Structure formats: C-alpha cells, structure tokens
Amino acid sequence: MSDNNIKVVTLIPSLNPCKKTIDYIEELIKIGFCNIIIINDGSSSDYDHIFKLLEKKQQCTVLKHAVNLGKGRALKTGFNYIFNNFEKSDICGVVTADADGQHSAEDTLKVALALDKSKESLVLGTRNFDDKNVPFKSSFGNNTTTMIFKFLYSKKIKDTQTGLRAIPFDFLTTCISLPGERFEYEINMLITAVKEKINIIEEEIETIYYEDNRETHFDPIKDSIKIYIVMFKHFFKYIISSLTSALIDILLFALLTKVVFNNSNTSKTIFLSTLFARICSSLFNYTVNKNIVFSNKVSSKKTFFKFYTLSVLLMIISWGFVTWLYRLFRVDTTVIKILVDLILFFVSYQIQRLWIFK
C-alpha cells in the first residue's frame, strides 16, 4: 500500500459476487491497497465477467476453486498462495474481508493500520450488534456465541463471526493448518489465537447490512451447528470423560461390595468399596483429561498433585454445601447433591482448563 506505507495483502473469498464486490475492491485500490487476492470459490459461470473484470486490475489476483469448497478452504487457499509469493519482509500480515458488502474500505484500512502498528496482534473489525439496523437473528446469534465463547475460553470477543480480520504473518503458519472448511474455520482461528496467547485487538467498524443481509452465504442452521461443535469440542470430551469416570466408579463400587469386600461389616464394606472405586475412576479421569480433553504436556507429577488437590477440595465443598442446604431447606439430600455437584462440575472444568492442565 504505497499511499499509506502499509505492507499487507488483502484476501477476499467470493461466491457469486455482486456489484458491491466490485465497488468495494475499487475503493480499496483508490485508498492505496495494492495487493488484493480474490478467491473465486466455485461461483456460477454467470459471474465469470466479474472475475475477469477484477483480473484486469493490476492490483488484483484471482484464484479459482473448480467447485464451492467453503470460506475456510478459500482462506487457506489464499494463505498458501501468499506463502508462495510473499516473504515476511514484504508484508506484515493479511487482511481478510467479505465480498458481500458488509465492510467499507475505510474500515479495512483501519484494521490494516492497527496490524501495522501492533505487528504481532490479531486485529478484529468488530460490529456493534446493538445497532437498530442489525437483523435480530444476527444480533441474537452473535451475542449468544460471544457469551458461550467467554465461558469456554475466558475471553470476551464482541464479534466472533467478523470476516474483517488483520492476521499477523507469523500466525498464518498456524492458520493454514487449522481444520474447518466453512464458517467454523473462523471460530477455530479465534480459539487457537486465545490458546496460543496471541494478543487480540478489537477495532469498532461500521455495521452494514443490505436487504437484511441477503447476500450472505451463511446457513443459520447448518453453519451454526458446525460452529458450536467446534466451540464445544473440548467441553464435550470433558463431559464424556466425566460420565465414563462416574460409570466406572459405580460399576467398581457394585463389584467390590458384592464380591471383594463382601462381609458382615457393612460400614467397612461401603468405605473400602467407595475408596478403591474412587481411586480407580479418578485415575482414569485424570489420564483422559490430561491426554485427550486438554492435551496437556506439563510434568505429570505437577498436574497429578493439582488434580487430586482439586478432587479433595470439591468433595469437601460438596459435602459442606449439601449439609448446609439440607439444614436450611430440609429438601431431599439427593436432589441437593445433584444441584450442588452440577455447579461444581462447571467450576471443575474451568479450574482444570485454566490451572491444572493449562
């Protein structure tokens, strides 16, 4: 970008582009963007004239998918091209943008400037979903995703689905190998950035919706399901690990009380069966959580001590709250224990993610 002295490549995935796509790219060129890559993601031949028009522009390069492969794949195609044609000394990063008219050239420049200033930060162009012209489904969907993302990854991102992003060059190596072929790819990028402790900057941009966002290729059902599957992937593993551990605990308890410690001393039988069953089930839970759920590589001794410290504390807390709430409300202790342990289940997930298997 000669006029603004910013070295970025602009990457625009496009499926069946409209007149607004041409207008947007012409505005980008006018304000100084000189390396623009457009991905024709399997568009109908009816749109060939638009891509041919863009190809004639000196600042533009058009890459083509023979069939529609999805936005995630289009972005990775673009990243691969950039790696093969640019060096880190040539550019500070890549600005990705949508072709549906939701971004202005001025806002694209805004995130590019923010990247040029920070160098190593992931810059997001954040829309204001409280704006009155935002369709309800877009506002509700994004606010819900923001809330869930914060719970699962302890990071509040106001616009998790923004396509306007300035990505630092060094992060592209990670981005090119991330799973995801459609819109779920972008949420995967955010999750990875948070995990790798990449600084995230949010730049407020204009909220633009044409005709209730009719130009978008986002499927509100199919794509939303894929996004939530990606977001909940580790939490689902955590649930399965916990349920399996509970099943092992119950089965071992039943086996030990009926076969191994079966004697006249009922109290002793229950205590020993509970103890051995809990040791075995918790060892299983620890192993699965460490190696599969959180994929932790830290010293086993350190995490092992933390895990069992948490287990003992949660057991004491559960006992204390169940006793206190029973005395207070005189409700069935089983009902109280289910509610208390459900809350502690979520607390345990956060502690394991943030402290034990960090």
Image (cartoon, rainbow, N blue to C red):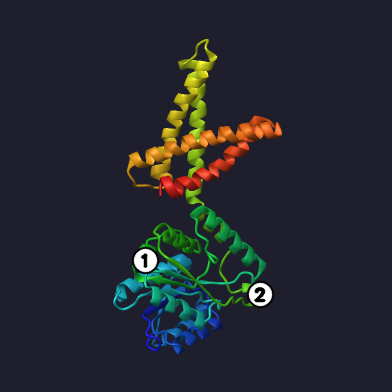
Residue 110 lies, with reference to residue 312, above or below; the image says below
Q: Is residue 69 visible?
A: no
Give the mark, 1 or 2, whose residue is nearer the N terminus.
2
Residue 107 percent location from the top left of the image: 51, 79
Q: Residue at x 60, y 38 (%)?
A: 340
- Identify which residue, 279 or 181, lies in the foreground: 279
Q: Which mark is residue 197?
A: none
What residue did someone put label 1 on? Answer: 171
- Identify which residue, 307 or 196, lies in the foreground: 307
Q: Residue at x 40, y 49 (%)?
A: 358
Q: Using the rendered view, name the quadrant where residue 31 is placed.
A: bottom left
Give, as a three-letter code, the residue at label 2: Asn
Q: Is residue 212 left or right of residue 121?
A: right
Q: Is residue 181 left or right of residue 142?
A: left
Other-residue count near label 1 (Cα within 10 Å), few / some / many at <14 / 14–19 / ≥20: some
Residue 308 lies, with reference to residue 84, above or below; the image says above
What residue did someone put label 2 on? Answer: 133
Other-residue count near label 2 (Cα within 10 Å), few / some / many at <14 / 14–19 / ≥20: few
Give, as a three-letter code, the residue at label 1: Phe
Q: Residue at x 35, y 73 (%)?
A: 81
Residue 260 percent location from the top left of the image: 45, 16
Q: Residue at x 37, y 66 (%)?
A: 171
Q: Estimate the spatial distance between the alpha carbons at disc 1 and disc 2, rounded to whole Å.
A: 34 Å
Q: Is residue 246 visible?
A: yes
Confirm or deny contact between disc 1 and disc 2 (CB under 8 A): no
Q: Using the rendered view, name the quadrant where residue 133 is placed.
A: bottom right
Q: Secondary structure at mark 2?
A: loop
Residue 233 percent location from the top left of the image: 48, 51
Q: Could you tell me how many numbered marks the image carries?
A: 2
Q: Is residue 264 left or right of residue 60?
A: right
- Farthest top residue in view: 264
